[in-house]
Image: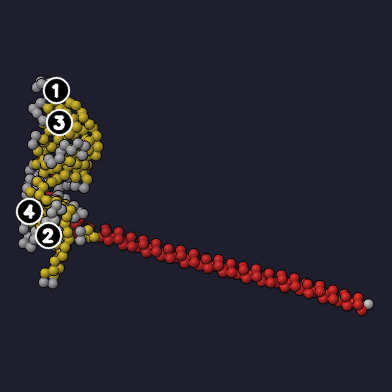
Amino acid sequence: MKKTMIAIALLSSIAMLTACGKANETGSTAATDAAETTVVMSDEETTEEDTTETQEEETTEEASETETETETEAGDTEEMNGAKSSDFVSIAGDWYIDGDPTLASIHIEPDGTFKTYYPGGILESAGTIRYEDEEIEGTVIHWYHLYNDNDGEYVMGFIDDGSEVKTDLYVGNGGEPHYQKFGEGGIADGGREPGEEFLGTWGCGRATLEIEQTGDGQFHALIHWGSSASSSVQWDYPLTYQDGKLVCDGKGTKTGIEFQSADADPDETVEYTDGSAEFIVQGAGIVWNDLTEHSGDEMVFMNEAPEA
């Protein structure tokens, strides 16, 4: 009996030991799993933090690049040839000595490029204006200096008087020659409406140009060019006033005219009806830019100044 009880006790102890062993193994496994889970979560948190920091850095870099680009674009817009764009707008236009369209002239674009003309509209030079400073006895003077693009030679200079709208330009310190603005807003325009400076009859060799106004901002040009006593060519353009020019966009007609006899009507042959051209005041004349066939290259139509 005692042996039996001892055996039962031993078996119970073994069973308990075995159960404890399994319990410890289970606890150890759970602890290990928990530790691994904690590590994984920590790694995930670290990854998320790293991603967030990377995104923030990229956003900061992009913002910085955008600001730099904006500053660059603003700088390009602000500065042209050493001046703000508005500085050249104030002198843009056509300028004649003493406001007389039969004398020498200067044409200035808002971007600071220019062309000078001899009397009669013959091109003298073309180049770029630079806005430059000169200090004289502690006073800074702002100059518009004109330079020839072909050789870089200095052409002439005007002092900036600081006004936003200019009607007079004086060359050098002595103020001679004196240029006055011609056209809209200028003293020499005589109260003209835009485009009125083109009106009238103009001639160049055997070619005659007639321009009339047909409506508000609308004009019509007719060029008659005699090639012989019996034949001629005629260009007919409906025109629109645009940025100081008269422009025909694809609606011009070219017609060949041939007289077979003095008693018969001429034969007319339409060569095209989709021509394009533009007319520009150059000095005291008008330039015809034939954009279809370049028939008017190097032609300047001359006439007395149109009446106001």
The residue indicated by pointer 1 is 265
Of the numbered discs 4 and 1, the one sitting upstream in the chain is 4
Image location of residue 230, percent across then percent down: 10, 26
Amino acid of disc 4: Asp
Identify which residue is drawn at 19% across, 47% down.
244
How packed is label 4: few (under 14 Cα within 10 Å), some, or many (20 or more)? many
Q: Are marks 4 and 2 in contact (CB under 8 Å)?
A: no
**Closer to the eye: label 1 or 2:** 2
Q: CA distance from mark 3 to mark 2?
A: 45 Å
Apparent side of residue 156 relative to residue 37 in the rendered image (left or right): left
Q: Nearer the viewer, residue 297 or 279?
A: 297
Q: Which mark is residue 104?
A: none
The residue indicated by pointer 2 is 158
Of the numbered discs 1 and 3, the one sitting upstream in the chain is 3
Identify which residue is drawn at 33% across, 60% down.
69
Image location of residue 305, percent across then percent down: 9, 45
Of the numbered discs 3 and 2, the one sitting upstream in the chain is 2
In this picture, is 240 found above or below 89? above
The part of the image, by quadrant, that contains residue 264 is: top left
The residue indicated by pointer 4 is 98
Q: Nearer the viewer, residue 125 or 15?
A: 15
Amino acid of disc 3: Val
The residue indicated by pointer 3 is 233
**Closer to the eye: label 4 or 2:** 2
Kindly give the residue lying farthest to the front in the view shown: 3
Identify which residue is drawn at 11% across, 69% down.
136
Q: Are marks 4 and 1 in contact (CB under 8 Å)?
A: no
Of the numbered discs 1 and 2, the one sitting upstream in the chain is 2
Q: Secondary structure at mark 4?
A: loop
**Closer to the eye: label 1 or 3:** 3
